[in-house]
Image (cartoon, rainbow, N blue to C red):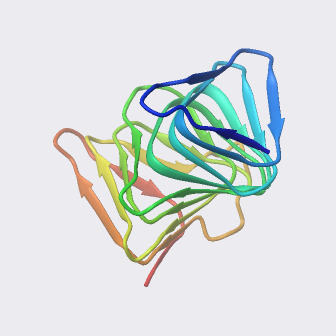
Amino acid sequence: NVLIDIPNGEFVIDVPSATTVSVNTLYTTERVRLLTGGSLSLAGPSEIERLSIEGGTLTGAGTVTITNSLNWTSGTMAGTGTTLIASGATLDINVSGTRTLNRTLANSGTIVVSADLMLGTNASFVNNTSGIFRINNGANVGISWTYSNTGNPFINAGQLISTANSGVSNLWVTLTNS
């Protein structure tokens, strides 16, 4: 288990290429960056205030709760666990790049997708009643033909909004709306 708390300061954890950091649980109010080729494996429930996935991999069986912000420019979320965007927190997907979801992504906050996101094996979205899922500017969310996905990839109980300032946005998933 790891607890990182530096009052009135910032501590950046960089997980560099070809490195895997495996811990049971991680609780931090600091920023965590996953760089290209680096992996962070979390086995148990964890809480991260600010996470940047910049080409690395977030994996493991634990539920990872984002309490402030997740900026996902490229890379992978994998494993049997869940990434939870907490109420009041945001997930921003806004840079051209390759992002693949291979785990459950649950949203009680706000997710803004302004660049393409592919769903792979074991991927699913759960947009909770307080969740806002916004697709902007012709971004696409869909199942990659290189993966087989037999589950319900998108369960929506919250708001699903498309705002196409330019282009057409596509949602290529099985949608269960409640």
**Residue toward you, 68 or 176:** 68
Write the residue at 50% across / 42% down: 117
Q: Residue at x 45, y 26 (%)?
A: 9
**Is residue 122 positioned above or below 157 on the image?**
above
Is 51 displayed left or right of 91 in the figure? right
Residue 124 percent across, percent down from the top left: 61, 61
Is residue 52 left or right of 62 when viewed as pictured?
left
Task: Using the rendered view, name the quadrant where residue 177 is placed.
Answer: bottom left
Residue furthest out toward the top:
17
In this view, the residue farthest toward the left is 165
Q: Is residue 72 left or right of residue 102?
A: left
Which quarter shows the C terminus?
bottom left
Number of numbered markers: 0
Residue 23 percent coordinates (x, y): 82, 40
Quarter holding residue 62: bottom right
Q: Residue at x 78, y 55 (%)?
A: 44
Q: Quadrant of the N terminus?
A: top right
Residue 130 is situated, as x and y percent measured from the top left of the image, at 37, 72
Q: Compare residues 16 and 121 and report the one nearer the observer.
A: 16
Q: Position of residue 131 (x, y in %)?
A: 38, 67
Q: Residue at x 32, y 51 (%)?
A: 135
Foreground pick, 148 / 73:
73
Image position of 90 with respect to 55: above or below: below
Q: Does 145 sit left or right of 130 as displayed?
A: right
Q: Residue furthest bottom?
A: 178
